[in-house]
Structures are given as structure tokens and as C-alpha cells.
Image (cartoon, helix red, strand yellow):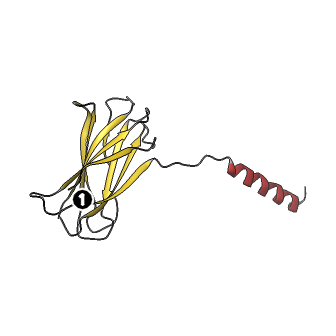
Amino acid sequence: MNTKKWLKASMVALLLGSWSLPTVATANVVKAEDLDVSCSGGCVDVWQVDCKDKATTFVAAKVKDPTVGNDAFVVTTIGYKGPTELIGQADQEFSPFETTNYSLAAWIKRPGNTHAATSAMVKILSVFNALPPSYNVEFSCRDFSFAEVGNPTVTLLQDQ
């Protein structure tokens, strides 16, 4: 096979092969929101995160200041299932100050190696209550190996 034919055959094989490659799906939800500053002791937003995928082991949330402002945010997760049963543990992380980088993920983990549909409450509060206290929060559902599974359903329960 001459070089020209070989290159042409290789290009066709590459193009056809790339169409069948799996694509990496992101399974996260990003929400943009503002906090009020008129609350006594600081304002708090509370989100409900529902991961319906049965492979869910972790529910994660991370927060950031979308502008390089002078505010930082705290993200706290608390796992639950049903009206009274707590699952896993609570976790808390801080967003970096004066950057647009996300905080580390605050997450809850189901007990042991279990996996099932899982819900969590996520609390966001401003550290300095700078004006305007706008934030972005990213929610994700993850399996035991921390790979993303299914998009979470998120609901803002308390908007302060």
C-alpha cells in the first residue's frame, strides 16, 4: 500500500472510530444565587439535593465567589433519608478568599460501601457578607469510586 492510500485509509478509520467513542458526561448542576445581608447573624441559603441514581454513594457540593470580590463562602452538607433518618456525616468547606476558584467539595457518604438514591441538605453562608454576596454552587452525585452518576435534582428551600 502506498503512503497516500495508507494515510487516506488511516484518516477514514480514525474518523469512523472517533464517532463511536463514548463521551464523558458530566453529572452536576450549577446554580447561581445571591445572599441577603439584612439577616441578624448572617443570611443562609439551604438547598435540598436529591440523587436518584441507585449507584450513588456520595453527594457533593462546592461553592465559589463568581467575581474576584472580597467575600468567601461556607458550604455545609448534611445527609438524610426520609423525614428523620440521618445518613453519613456532615461536612463543611470554605471557598478561597479573593479568587473565583471553587472550594473543596463538602460531601456526605453513605455508610460503608452502600449505594442507593440519596438526599442531602446543603447550607451556604457568606463569611464576610460583602456586597453583593453572589455565589455559584455546584452539586454532584458520585459512586463509590467518586465517578459522577446521574444529575441531581436541586431545590432552594430557604432563600435569604
| Residue drawn at point x = 79 percent, y = 55 percent | 12
The spot of residue 39 in percent (x, y) is 12, 59
| Residue 104 visible somewhere in the drawing | no
The spot of residue 119 in percent (x, y) is 32, 37
Depth check, front residue: 124 or 91: 124
| Residue drawn at point x = 16 percent, y = 63 percent | 37
| Residue 132 visible somewhere in the drawing | yes
45, above or below 141, in the image: below
The spot of residue 15 in percent (x, y) is 73, 55
- SS assignment at label 1: strand
| Residue drawn at point x = 30 percent, y = 64 percent | 65
Q: Is residue 16 left or right of residue 103?
A: right
Q: Kindly identify the amino acid type of the residue bearing the numbered disc 1.
A: Phe
**Dot 1 alpha-carbon crowd within 10 angstroms: few under 14, some 14 to 19, many 20 or more:** many
Count of numbered circles on the image = 1
130, above or below 47, in the image: below
113, above or below 108, in the image: above
The spot of residue 57 in percent (x, y) is 38, 35
Tell me where residue 1 sits by quadrant: bottom right
| Residue drawn at point x = 44 percent, y = 44 percent | 151
Q: Is residue 24 left or right of residue 20?
A: left
Tell me where residue 128 sits by quadrant: bottom left
Residue tagged 1: 73
